[in-house]
Image (spheres, grey):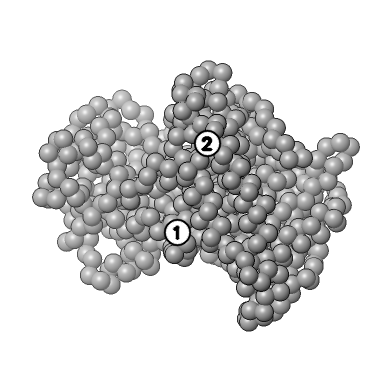
């Protein structure tokens, strides 16, 4: 072992092994994982939650978020879960997760009420915004984006993770912080594969864990750092936590879990690569800043127009559907905009410049009503993840006053820097695990939720699907038994995890991450073809054979980073396999192949589902509408939950 390892300030438990057993094992302690654990514990099951960070503030929403999309059953809502879930599916041209979106729309407000009961803040209880157009003074709920239909709520998301941790402790959930999950354990019973738990490692001490469970819930993050990585700025992350890199995807793929839409990727917008400005710190008028007044370099206001091209004269009109429009969607992974004209809402520079507007553009909150200015800058920027301190506090301390000053908007819509075509990211309903109506994977005993699911969404999606997966996993655990695991599998995983500690002079994790990103840019970028993809796969496999054995580190923290990059390598290979299996181009998937330029032929309009068995990639094709009638299929399987909620 490298001598520098012993300078680590925590106990040295490398080589020690501990076996823990439970009914339901939850891997990942973000919003989805916490709610999965709570749901399972409420059903009387013993629960262990494993989280690589500190659960109280871990995950993409750990430091907060400003809105909760698709709370369709709140008392002020003018839309149904069916209407919004079907809008998600239609907007994504059916390359969408109808099951999970319907769960999000049907159960999302229930989870908000849960959070309120745990001590989270979902209402303007201090009457700070009394009388505002976006506030219902009876319930004190506050709404975003569509002020007529009232299905997206403004919330105090920074209060949520501590509230969830308190509730898990109250319910007796065992929470293992600073512990990374590294591999799923499976067993074959009567010719069928079952999930029987997982392996993990304490990232402070190096202790190895074997977790035995009747049911396992994957609740980890979507992939990141696959195409973009800057070795000189490894600590910078403007949106998602640096450690959220898709380890659950890698674990699932290696265990034989089925994935779909992994060929989908869009041009990068936020990343840990040092390529973008701080999120929500540049006056963009999307999401948190919606619908900020935008002006050009001369101070000339850029008008908003409705879906039919009618210029909107007041700020309030920006938040109302156009005449004859039922609703419009904002704030999540999709935009069903009220605007046909791609003006300030997406900052279509070419069109605006043709109309005579001069760059640069600015967000000018001083021209908005006081309550709109205060709710954007004071509340939403203050509650959105990673903006309370670096944006709201730091800008204010340096003299920024939204009633007098403007913020320059550097990009188009969400984008806050100019990215190259080959610089891509898992963004906007990305690929992930394919599942059934129980959120169960193709392996019995393994469930998934949140960002592990294909076409995942934002906070409400994570909370609703997490709770749903947790209760389904609990039901299965109550009816099942604790199956044994293969000790040789665990031994091999321990050996793999510790190997970099015993390499004296080798390759660091940053170098491998940078090599993977460069390979993916070169061989799996904006335009793909069979020859490039196969060369890329060969290159990645050479990294696995030649570079991975040379990886070295000095302490358990660097060891964790090394494990993450090995997972990134696995995800990169999965992306290339998915790209090879889709032999056509696809506009909804942002997927182009030069050797198959025909876009979206009928024979390829399906989910291409992939898993691996004994190193061989197995494909099956699934109709885009496989989930059936959303309301009927949901109610068929959730009568107990419906009755329980009705009784509250």
Labels 2 and 1: the sequence-earlier one: 1
Q: Is residue 543 visible?
A: yes
- Relative height, residue 348 to residue 380 (above, below): above
Query: Among all residues in the image, which is located at the extreme right?
Result: 190
- Give left or right: position of 446 versus 461: right
Q: Where residue 318 sits in the image (x, y, percent)?
A: 26, 40
- In-front residue for pair 587/647: 587
Q: Is residue 570 visible?
A: no
- Give left or right: position of 265 versus 449: left
Q: Where residue 277 sits in the image (x, y, percent)?
A: 34, 57
- Relative height, residue 431 to residue 7 (above, below): above
- Callout 1 environment at 10 Å: few (<14), some (14 to 19), or many (20+)? some
Query: Among all residues in the image, which is located at the extreme top?
Result: 602
Residue drawn at the location 17% of the way across and 47% of the way down: 359
> SS of the residue at dot 1?
loop
Res 152 label: none
Q: Where residue 575 sits in the image (x, y, percent)?
A: 57, 40
> SS of the residue at dot 2?
helix
- Relative height, residue 543 to residue 591 (above, below): below
- In-front residue for pair 6/386: 6
* Total tally of numbered discs in the picture: 2
Residue drawn at the location 32% of the way across and 58% of the way down: 281
- In-front residue for pair 51/534: 534
Res 532 label: 2
- Give left or right: position of 206 versus 417: right
Residue carrying label 1: 230
Nearer the viewer's eye, disc 2 or disc 1? 2
């Amino acid at each position: 072992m490298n001598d520098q390892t012993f300078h680590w300030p925590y106990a040295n438990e490398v080589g020690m092994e501990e076996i823990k057993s439970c009914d339901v094992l939850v891997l990942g302690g973000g919003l989805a994982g916490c709610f999965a654990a709570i749901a399972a514990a409420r059903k009387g099951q013993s629960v262990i939650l494993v989280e690589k960070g500190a659960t109280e503030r871990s995950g993409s929403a750990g430091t907060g978020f400003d809105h909760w999309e698709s709370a369709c059953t709140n008392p002020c809502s003018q839309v149904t879960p069916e209407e919004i879930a079907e809008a998600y599916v239609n907007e994504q041209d059916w390359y969408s997760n109808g099951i999970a979106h319907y769960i999000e729309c049907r159960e999302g407000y229930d989870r908000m009420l849960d959070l309120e009961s745990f001590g989270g803040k979902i209402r303007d209880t201090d009457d700070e915004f009394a009388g505002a157009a976006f506030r219902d003074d009876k319930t004190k709920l506050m709404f975003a984006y569509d002020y007529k239909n009232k299905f997206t709520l403004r919330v105090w998301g920074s209060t949520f993770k501590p509230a969830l941790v308190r509730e898990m402790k109250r319910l007796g959930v065992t929470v293992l912080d600073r512990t990374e999950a590294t591999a799923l354990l499976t067993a074959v019973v009567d010719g069928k594969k079952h999930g029987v738990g997982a392996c993990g490692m304490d990232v402070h001490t190096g202790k190895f864990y074997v977790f035995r469970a009747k049911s396992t819930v994957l609740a980890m993050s979507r992939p990141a750092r696959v195409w973009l990585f800057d070795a000189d700025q490894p600590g910078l992350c403007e949106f998602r936590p640096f450690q959220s890199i898709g380890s659950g995807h890698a674990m699932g793929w290696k265990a034989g879990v089925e994935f779909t839409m992994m060929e989908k990727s869009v041009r990068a917008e936020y990343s840990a690569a040092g390529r973008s400005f701080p999120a929500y710190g540049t006056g963009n008028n999307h999401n948190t800043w919606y619908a900020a007044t935008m002006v050009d370099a001369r101070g000339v206001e850029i008008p908003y127009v409705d879906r039919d091209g009618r210029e909107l004269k007041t700020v309030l009109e920006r938040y109302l559907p156009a005449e004859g429009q039922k609703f419009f969607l904002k704030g999540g992974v999709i935009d069903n905009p009220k605007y046909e004209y791609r003006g300030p809402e997406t900052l279509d520079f070419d069109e605006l410049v043709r109309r005579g507007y001069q760059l640069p553009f600015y967000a000018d909150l001083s021209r908005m009503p006081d309550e709109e200015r205060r709710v954007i800058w004071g509340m939403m920027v203050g509650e959105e993840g990673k903006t309370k301190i670096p944006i709201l506090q730091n800008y204010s301390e340096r003299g920024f006053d939204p009633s007098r000053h403007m913020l320059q908007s550097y990009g188009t819509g969400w984008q806050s820097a100019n990215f190259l075509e080959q610089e891509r990211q898992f963004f906007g309903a990305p690929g992930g695990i394919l599942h059934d109506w129980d959120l169960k994977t193709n392996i019995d005993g393994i469930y998934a939720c949140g960002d592990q699911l294909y076409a995942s969404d934002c906070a409400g999606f994570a909370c609703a699907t997490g709770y749903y997966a947790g209760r389904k996993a609990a039901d299965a655990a109550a009816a099942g038994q604790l199956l044994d695991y293969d000790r040789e599998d665990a031994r091999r995983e321990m050996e793999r995890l510790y190997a970099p500690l015993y390499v004296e002079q080798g390759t660091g994790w940053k170098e491998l991450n940078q090599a993977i990103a460069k390979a993916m840019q070169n061989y799996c970028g904006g335009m793909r073809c069979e020859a490039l993809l196969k060369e890329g796969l060969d290159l990645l496999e050479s990294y696995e054979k030649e570079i991975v054995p040379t990886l070295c580190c000095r302490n358990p923290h660097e060891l964790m980073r090394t494990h993450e990059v090995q997972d990134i390598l696995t995800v990169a290979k999965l992306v290339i396999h998915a790209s090879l299996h889709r032999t056509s181009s696809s506009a909804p998937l942002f997927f182009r192949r030069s050797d198959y330029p025909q876009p979206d032929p009928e024979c390829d309009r399906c989910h291409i589902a992939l898993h691996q068995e004994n190193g061989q990639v197995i494909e099956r094709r699934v109709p885009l509408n496989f989930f059936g009638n959303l309301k009927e299929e949901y109610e068929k399987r959730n009568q107990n939950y419906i009755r329980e909620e009705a009784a509250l």
